[in-house]
Image: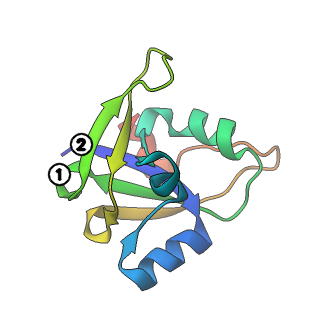
Amino acid sequence: MVMIVHALLRKEWEVALINGVYTAASLKKEGFIHCSPVDKIVAVANYNYHGTKGLVLLCLDTSKIKAEVLWEDLYNEGREYPHIYGELNLDAVLHTYDFEPNEEGGFSLPADLESMR
């Protein structure tokens, strides 16, 4: 099993739970859902969501994701990130975590994910 993670606003997660599937805004705009390996999510969150409250971190089992998952370096950074090319089926979600910034606005991994870095 390969686990990847995706950060989203709690209200977006609540909509996904009602709809039974998750479709990020990036899926419509870019054609895929941005994800991250566990060891890179803190840097990604600090860059994209610094200080944003009300986030949820989804832990995803790539073997259960029905849409195609591609690892790509779309921005020529020398690092590949996983992208989900379609809706995310919720049975691929292994665990969710509240993902809140600290007082300075930065993020850190939930304690039980630290060992997966």
Secondary structure under tag 1 reads helix
Tell me which amino acid carries mark 1. Answer: Ser
Residue visible at 43% across and 20% down? Answer: 79
Rendering colour mode: rainbow
Disc 1 + disc 2, Cβ < 8 Å = yes
- The image quadrant of residue 93 is bottom left
> Which is in the foreground here, disc 1 or disc 2?
1
Provide residue 6's location: percent of width, then percent of height. Answer: 46, 51
Residue visible at 66% across and 41% down? Answer: 48
Provide residue 43's location: percent of width, then percent of height. Answer: 59, 33
Tell me which amino acid carries mark 2. Answer: Val
Provide residue 113's location: percent of width, then percent of height. Answer: 42, 46
Secondary structure under tag 2 reads loop
Answer above or below: position of 18 versus 67.
Answer: below
Outermost bottom residue: 18
Residue toward you, 21 or 29: 29
User: Could you tell me how far apart the alpha carbons at marks 1 and 2 are, in whole angstroms?
Assistant: 7 Å
Decide which of tag 1 and tag 2 comes sooner along the chain.
2
Numbered tag placed on residue 2 in the rendering: 2
Circle 1 sits on which residue?
Answer: 63
Residue visible at 67% across and 35% down? Answer: 47
Numbered tag placed on residue 115 in the rendering: none
